[in-house]
Structures are given as C-alpha cells and as structure tokens.
Image (spheres, rainbow, N blue to C red):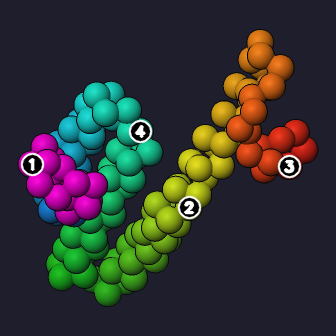
Amino acid sequence: VFYGNKFFGESGLYYSALIAGLADTDAITISMAKFALLEDKLILAANVIVTATLSNMAVKLGIVFLKGSKKTGNLVGYSFGSVVLLGILYISLNGKISSLLSRTCLYNRYMKSSSPTIPNLPPSWREGSL
C-alpha cells in the first residue's frame, strides 16, 4: 500500500487493493485504516477497502463456479452479483455524496460562526439554495 501510493498515487491504492483482495482483505483493511488516520482521507480508504472486498468476492465466486455444483454457482452468483453491484454503486456515488457533505459542513460552519458575513461565500451556499 505504501509503495502503491508513493509511486502511483491514489490509483496505486486501488491496484494494491485489487491484488491484495485476491488473497485476503484483512491486511488492506488495516493498512487503509492507518492511512486514513495519518492522511485524513477516510472516503478514499473506504473506497479502497470496498475494492479489495469486491476483488476477494470475485475470487471466491470463481472457486464456487469451478468446484461447486451448478445450483450452488447460480445461488452464490446471484448473491455476490447483488453485493458487487452495490459496491460499485457505493464507489461511484461516494465522490458525489462526499462533495455534497463537505459543502453542507462548510455551510453549517458558516451559519454558526460569530462573524455575520464572509465576503467570498459562493451564491450556491447561501441559505435555502442547498
């Protein structure tokens, strides 16, 4: 994780998650928990952990299809497929939700501040426009 981030940036974290998820998700989860504390990038860490989990699930699904019966493969395929779709949806919407939350937090901080006006507040952050 350290070298993936150092040499490839955020995309390196995702590649590390895909590779680490092939075997297990414990190591990447612990690494990203520490990374989020040090770097203050909680949303990135959550996305990387979800990516590792999806990678791990893909491996398990492959094992079920190779070693299990057709009925078991179908049952696990439908179950894992729904989880994979939710994971992909989570990662894709997470950036949009986080930007909305950061705007809301900044707006709330502005409204509770002791100074009555901040001259450069964008019009979209004014009361009633969120």
Question: Can you tell which of label 2 and label 3 is closer to the viewer?
Answer: 3
Residue count near mark 4 (Cα–Cα under 10 Å), binned few <14, some 14–19, many ≥20 = some
Q: Amino acid at mark 4?
A: Leu
Q: Relative to residue 82, is residue 42 drawn left or right?
A: left
Could you say which disc has been placed on residue 93 in the image? 2
- Amino acid of disc 3: Ser
- Residue type at mark 1: give it: Tyr
Q: Main secondary structure of the magenta part?
A: helix
Rounded to the nearest angstrom, the CA distance separating label 3 from label 1 is: 43 Å
Residue 1 x/y as whole percent: 15, 47
Comes first in the chain, label 4 or label 1: 1
Give the Cα distance between marks 4 and 3.
Answer: 27 Å
State which region is magenta: 1-16
Please state the horizontal and vertical placement of residue 39, each as a whole percent of the image: 31, 33
Mark with earlier residue (2, 4): 4
Camera sees residue 124: yes
First in sequence: mark 3 or mark 1?
1
SS of the residue under disc 2: helix
- Residue 14 among magenta residues: yes
Label placed on residue 78 = none
Q: Position of residue 76 (x, y in %)?
A: 38, 73
**CA separation, marks 2 and 1?**
27 Å
User: Percent x, y for residue 77?
Assistant: 39, 77
Relative horizontal placement of residue 88, taking residue 9 as reference (left or right): right
Name the residue at 80% across, 48% down. 123
Residue furthest out toward the front: 119
Disc on the earlier residue, 4 or 3: 4
Please give the name of the residue rendered at 46% of the width and 67% of the height, measured from the top-left corner.
88
Find disc 4 in the rendering and name its residue: 42
Q: Quadrant of residue 54?
A: bottom left
| Mark 3, residue position | 129
